[in-house]
C-alpha cells in the first residue's frame, strides 16, 4: 500500500468504538503508562533549567571568541526534544532526548569541555558522562533527577532564533554529518506529528503498541527489531488510512494490515522528497543496499532513510508471528470475545524452546561493565545473523537483557545476560537452492583458537533433539562463536580482556534462571528447586517446571526422575580470566509412562492433562498412540498415552471441544513447539482426538 493511498475508511466512530477505546485507555492507566502531572511539571522545569544553562554557556563561549557581551547575548541557542517525549508517548521515569542547537562558531570541543564543566558544577546534575566518540556524540546525565541525553547540532548560521523551524530544509545546509544525524530525531518526530490526522488517537495507539512490542519481545533496533521511531511510523500510517478512527479500531487495523503487508514493500507517510541539498535518500530502485532491506519503514523528514535497516530474516519472522497473534486477539477483542489485556501478555520466549544460547557478559568494574555490555550488545546482531545462516536451525534472539542479582554473582562481579532461542530442523532435501550452507560449512572447517568442545556442542544439538533430532544432521555453532569472540577481542576493549569476560553457553529450558522470567510466568508456570548437581558457590538455582497444574497443589502421584550423570559443555572467551566454571548439563532422556483414568468432566480433563497451561502446550502423533511433548514438562521427560477403549464415550465431546477452540487457546500450536506455523495442527488434532485421554504421572 503506497503513500499515495490517502485513506481506506472515513467512517465515524460508533458507541461501541467509544466504549472499547475507553477500555484501552483504562488498561494503559492500569499499566502505569502515563506520567503523573507532578512528574510532567518536573520535566518542564528541568528542560527550562537546561535551556538556561545552554544559553549562558553560548554567551560565555562567544565572549571567549572575541564577541562583545552585547553581541554575544544576541546569538542565541535552542533546546528541542525528540523521541518519545516529543511525540508525547513517554512513560513514568523515561529519559528525555534533547538537542542543543547552536551557531557555527560554537564547536564540538566547546560542547564537551566548557558545557560539560558548567553542568559538572551544578549540584542538581549527577551521573554526567560525555561520549564524544559516539556515532551521534552525546552527553548523558541526570538533571534534577531526570535522565537526559543531550546532543549537539551546529548550524551554518550566525544567530539561532527562538522561532527556528526545525523542519526547514535550509537548516541542513553546509552542516557536518554529525549535525545532520542529530537533527534527524526532532525533524522526524515533528513531521510524524504533522502528518497524523488526530494526535490524541495516534498517541494512545502508539502507547499500546510500545507496551505490546516491549512485552512480546520485539522492541529494540540494536538486535534487529524495531525502535520507537519505526513503531511510530507504522502507527501513524494506520492513522492516515483511518483518519476518524478511535484507538480500538486503529489498533485492530494495525495488526490486520501489517499481518498482510507484502514486505519488502516500504511503509511511508508521504512520497520521498529528493530535496535540493544533495543528501542521499532511500531509493530501492537505484541503490542496491536499499533494495536488500527486508522491512523498510521510511522516515518522513528529508533526507528520508530506512529506520529498520537492522532487520534480518529471523527478526522479520518473529515480528510476523506477533502480527498474526495480535490480529487474532484484537479481532476477538473488538467482538467482546477476548479481553484487550490478552494482547499485552508477556512473551512465552523462555518456555517456548528446548534449547537456548546464553550470552553472559561480566566484568569487575561497574563503569566498565556498562560500557563493555553496550559494546557486546552492539555486536550481537551480527552474531545472530551468522547463526541464522547455519543450516537446519532456526533462531529467536530476545532483545531484553537481564542483570544478574548481586547475591548470585561471585564477589566483585557484575553480570548481564541475553538469550537466543534455538530450534533444530530436519534437513529438507527439497529446500530451495541458493542458501549460505556451503559457505558456512567451509567457514566452520577452521576453528583455531576456540576454547570449546566441538563434539559436546554437536552432541547437545543432535542427541538431545530439538523437536526431533536427525542422527545424520550436525549443527556446529563453534565457528560462529569463535568469529564473535574475534570481533570482540579486536574491538575497543582489547586491553581489558583480563577483566571483561563474555561467555556463550548452550543451555536447556530447565536451566533458565528464575530471575529472567516475567513475574506472571514465574507465578503460574514454574517453581524453584535447588539443583543438587550444582553445588558450586554462587551458582543459580535451577528451574523445574511443574508436572501438572499449580505446583503448590497436592497431586496423588508425581513423576520421579532418575538421577543420571551428565556431561557438560561450555564455550568461554579465549584469554579470559576464569571467574567460575559455567557448565550446562546434558540430561539423559528419561521416559515416564502414564496411566489413563476416567475424566470426571471436560474442564478437569484439560486441567490435568495439560497442567493448567494455556498456550504453552503441544502434541504430536506417534505410532503407538499420542505422544504429548509439553513445554511445561522438564526437558528430560515425556508422556506416552495409549488409547483406552473404556474412555471412548468421552472422546467425541472432547474432540468437538478441541475443534471449536482456536489452535493457540487449545494449546496445539506448532509455534509453541518451536516449529514453523502451519495448518497441520488442526488435521493432527482431528486425527488424534480419539486417542486423547486423561493422564496422571505415576512413579
Image (cartoon, rainbow, N blue to C red):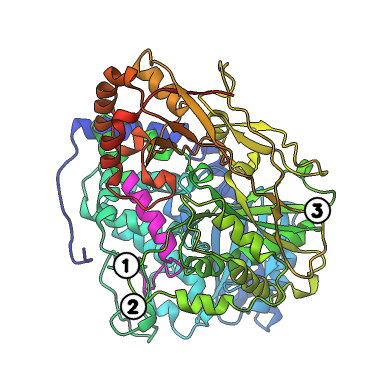
Q: Position of residue 655 (x, y in %)?
A: 27, 28
Q: Is residue 47 something that shows in the picture? A: no
Q: Which residue is mark 3?
A: 580
Gap in Å between the C-alphas at discs 1 and 2? Answer: 27 Å
Nearest the viewer among 673 and 172 is 673
Q: Earlier in the sequence, mark 2 or mark 3?
A: 2
Identified at 36% across, 27% down, the residue is: 643
Within-10-Å neighbours for mark 1: few <14, some 14–19, many 20+: few
Q: Residue furthest right?
A: 411
SS class, disc 1: loop
Question: Does residue 577 appear to the left or right of 1 in the view shown?
Answer: right
SS class, disc 2: helix
Looking at the image, do the residues carrying marks 2 and 3 touch, with CB atoms under 8 Å apart? no
- Foreground mark, 2 or 3? 3
Q: Which residue is mark 2?
A: 291
| Picture quarter with the N terminus | bottom left
Residue 339 lies in what quarter of the image?
top left
Q: Which residue is mark 1?
A: 430
Q: Which region shows up in magenta?
A: 301-325
Is residue 83 depicted above or below 536 in this figure? below
Identified at 50% across, 46% down, the residue is: 349
Q: Earlier in the sequence, mark 1 or mark 3?
A: 1
| Picture quarter with the C terminus | top right
Q: Residue furthest top?
A: 600
Q: Earlier in the sequence, mark 1 or mark 2?
A: 2
Mark carried by residue 211: none
Gap in Å between the C-alphas at discs 2 and 3? Answer: 47 Å
Q: Is residue 288 something that shows in the picture? A: yes
Q: Position of residue 268 (x, y in %)?
A: 29, 66
Q: Is residue 223 magenta?
A: no
Amino acid at each position: 500500500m503506497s503513500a499515495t493511498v490517502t485513506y481506506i475508511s472515513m467512517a465515524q466512530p460508533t458507541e461501541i468504538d467509544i466504549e472499547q477505546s475507553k477500555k484501552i485507555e483504562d488498561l494503559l492507566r492500569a499499566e502505569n503508562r502515563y506520567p503523573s502531572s507532578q512528574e510532567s511539571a518536573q520535566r518542564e522545569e528541568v528542560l527550562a533549567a537546561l535551556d538556561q544553562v545552554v544559553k549562558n554557556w553560548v554567551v560565555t563561549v562567544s565572549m571567549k571568541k572575541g564577541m562583545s557581551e552585547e553581541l554575544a547575548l544576541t546569538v542565541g541557542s535552542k533546546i528541542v526534544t525528540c523521541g518519545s517525549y516529543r511525540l508525547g508517548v513517554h512513560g513514568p521515569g523515561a529519559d528525555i532526548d534533547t538537542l542543543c542547537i547552536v551557531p557555527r562558531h560554537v564547536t564540538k570541543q566547546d560542547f564537551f569541555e566548557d558545557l560539560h564543566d558548567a553542568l559538572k558544577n551544578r549540584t542538581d546534575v549527577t551521573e554526567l558522562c560525555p561520549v564524544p566518540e559516539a556515532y551521534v556524540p552525546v552527553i548523558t546525565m541526570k538533571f534534577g533527577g531526570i535522565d537526559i541525553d543531550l546532543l549537539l547540532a551546529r548550524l551554518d548560521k550566525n544567530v539561532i532564533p527562538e522561532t527556528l523551524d526545525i523542519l526547514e530544509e535550509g537548516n541542513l545546509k553546509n552542516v557536518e554529518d554529525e549535525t545532520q544525524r542529530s537533527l534527524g530525531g526532532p525533524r522526524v518526530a515533528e513531521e510524524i506529528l504533522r502528518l497524523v490526522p488526530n494526535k490524541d488517537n495516534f498517541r494512545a495507539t502508539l502507547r499500546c503498541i510500545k507496551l505490546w512490542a516491549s512485552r512480546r519481545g520485539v522492541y529494540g533496533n540494536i538486535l534487529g527489531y524495531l525502535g520507537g521511531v519505526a513503531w511510530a511510523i507504522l502507527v501513524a500510517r494506520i492513522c492516515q488510512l483511518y483518519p476518524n478512527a478511535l484507538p480500538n479500531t486503529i489498533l485492530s487495523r494495525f495488526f490486520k494490515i501489517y499481518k498482510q503487508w507484502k514486505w519488502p514493500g516500504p511503509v511511508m507517510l508521504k512520497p520521498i522528497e529528493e530535496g535540493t541539498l544533495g543528501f542521499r535518500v532511500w531509493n530501492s530502485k537505484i541503490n542496491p543496499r536499499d533494495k536488500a532491506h527486508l522491512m523498510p519503514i521510511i522516515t518522513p523528514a528529508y533526507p528520508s532513510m530506512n529506520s529498520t535497516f537492522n532487520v534480518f530474516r529471523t527478526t522479520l519472522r518473529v515480528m510476523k508471528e506477533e502480527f498474526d497473534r495480535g490480529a487474532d486477539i484484537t479481532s476477538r477483542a473488538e467482538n467482546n470475545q477476548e479481553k484487550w489485556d490478552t494482547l499485552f501478555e508477556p512473551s512465552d520466549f523462555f518456555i517456548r524452546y528446548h534449547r537456548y544460547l546464553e550470552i553472559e557478559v561480566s566484568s569487575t568494574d561497574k563503569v566498565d561493565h556498562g560500557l563493555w555490555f553496550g559494546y557486546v550488545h552492539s555486536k550481537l546482531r551480527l552474531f545472530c545473523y551468522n547463526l541464522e545462516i547455519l543450516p537446519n536451525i532456526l533462531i529467536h534472539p530476545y532483545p531484553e537483557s537481564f542483570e544478574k542479582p548481586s547475591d548470585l554473582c561471585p564477589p566483585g562481579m557484575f553480570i548481564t545476560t541475553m538469550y537466543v532461542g534455538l530450534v533444530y530442523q530436519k534437513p529438507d532435501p527439497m529446500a530451495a537452492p541458493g542458501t549460505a550452507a556451503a559457505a558456512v560449512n567451509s567457514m566452520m572447517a577452521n576453528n583455531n583458537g576456540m576454547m570449546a568442545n566441538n563434539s559436546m556442542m554437536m552432541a547437545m544439538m543432535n542427541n538431545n533433539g530439538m523437536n526431533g533430532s536427525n542422527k545424520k544432521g550436525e549443527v556446529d555453532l563453534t565457528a560462529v562463536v569463535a568469529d564473535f569472540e574475534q570481533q570482540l577481542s579486536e574491538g575497543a576493549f582489547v586491553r581489558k580482556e583480563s577483566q571483561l569476560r563474555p561467555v556463550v553457553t548452550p543451555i536447556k529450558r530447565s536451566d533458565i534462571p528464575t530471575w529472567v522470567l516475567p513475574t506472571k510466568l514465574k507465578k503460574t508456570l514454574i517453581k524453584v528447586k535447588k539443583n543438587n548437581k550444582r553445588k558450586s558457590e554462587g551458582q543459580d538455582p535451577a528451574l523445574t517446571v511443574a508436572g501438572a497444574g499449580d505446583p503448590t497443589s497436592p497431586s496423588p502421584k508425581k513423576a520421579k526422575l532418575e538421577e543420571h550423570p551428565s556431561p557438560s559443555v561450555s564455550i568461554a572467551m579465549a584469554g579470559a580470566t576464569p571467574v567460575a566454571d559455567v557448565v550446562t548439563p546434558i540430561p539423559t532422556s528419561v521416559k515416564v509412562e502414564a496411566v489413563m483414568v476416567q475424566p470426571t468432566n471436560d474442564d478437569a480433563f484439560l486441567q490435568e492433562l495439560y497442567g493448567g497451561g494455556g498456550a504453552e502446550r503441544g502434541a504430536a502423533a506417534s505410532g503407538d498412540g499420542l505422544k504429548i511433548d509439553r513445554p511445561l514438562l522438564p526437558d528430560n521427560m515425556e508422556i506416552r498415552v495409549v488409547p483406552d477403549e473404556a474412555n471412548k464415550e468421552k472422546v467425541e465431546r472432547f474432540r468437538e471441544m478441541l475443534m471449536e477452540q482456536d489452535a493457540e487457546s487449545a494449546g496445539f500450536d506448532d509455534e509453541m513447539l518451536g516449529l514453523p506455523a502451519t495448518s497441520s495442527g488442526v488435521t493432527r488434532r482431528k486425527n488424534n482426538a480419539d486417542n486423547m485421554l486423561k493422564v496422571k504421572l505415576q512413579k
